[in-house]
Amino acid sequence: MLNLSKIKCFKRSTSYLCSNVMNLIRLRCDSKLKKIRPFKFLTWHHGFMYFKAQSRDGENVFIKVDTQIFCIENEAHICSLLNSKSFISAPNVKFFKKYNGMSVVIFDYIDGEALKSKSLREKPELVIDAFKILKEFTRLGLCHRDIKFDNFILTDKLILIDFTYVEKLPLYNNDLILAKAPDRIEKDLGFHLSVSPRAWNDYYSFNRMIDEAFGNSNVDCQYYHDIYQIKKECNDRANNQQYTFCSKGNVIN
């Protein structure tokens, strides 16, 4: 039985779908896709819609459609940058286009599942893998702003996803031009994972992930030292202005 929340999600998603039927038809022609079908249709994500489809060659692809805030171009830019930098832990971008009323990015489909607390407890080595990915991402001068379990996908390796709200770190130089997230989005973005309202530090968020996964549980002695060192480095970086982005344009003191 559908609950009230799912009914609301269905109503919103249906309205976005209906208002963009012609755009979706154009997308199908432009990208030569077939078998386009909704993915997680009862999920509300600030006007995003998700689809699965097949390319002309029969390969599965994932489609992310932005019908409201139009920050999805960030995702295409960041993924293209990561792909060009041989950052193997990011989705591969196949297509990006703006339409009248929606923007679309298409990726190779990732066949995996989101990390969970249980995943880290059962395989503590995943903490090490995720931390390496995060450090490499930071090295490029980027702040993800939404580091959480759902944004790490586990396949035969870990993949970091969802770059819509990425920002440049204040003390790094790069020439990226990124769309700003609307004020109403930033109020919710990261929620309890942010250092403080309108301030984001990916290492603070990652530390919270580790705490949530292990709590008072004992860590496998084989990985205890590694995870202890990771938490120590996360704490150091969480308190370092270099790794904190503040949307008001000021670094947190």
Image (tube, rainbow, N blue to C red):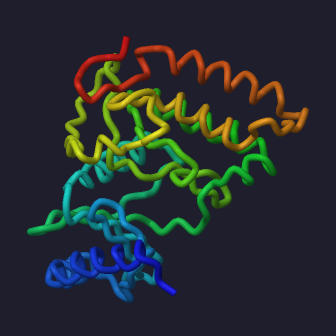
- Residue 145 at what x, y percent from top left? 41, 38
112 or 190: which is nearer to us?
190
76 to the left or right of 38: left
Q: Is residue 180 left or right of residue 106?
A: left
**Is residue 95 something that shows in the picture?**
no
Q: Quadrant of residue 64?
A: bottom left
Front in this rendered view, residue 179 or 86: 179
Q: How many marks?
A: 0
Residue 65's place in the image compared with 76, above or below, is: below
Residue plotted at (53% across, 48% down): 89
In the image: residue 45, left or right of residue 183: right
Q: Quadrant of residue 38?
A: bottom left
Instruction: State the residue lying farthest toward the left.
Output: 100
Residue 241: tell me if it is visible. Answer: yes
Across and down, in percent, residue 157 comes to 65, 53
Residue sitting nearer the eye, 197 or 234 = 197
The residue nearer to you, when weighing 116 against 130, is 116
Residue 86 in percent (x, y) is at 48, 43
Instruction: State which quadrant residue 222 falls in.
Output: top right
Q: In the rendered view, would you say 246 is above or below 159?
A: above
Instruction: Tell me what residue is drawn at x 28 percent, y 47 percent.
Output: 185
- Residue 217 placement (x, y as % from top left): 83, 39
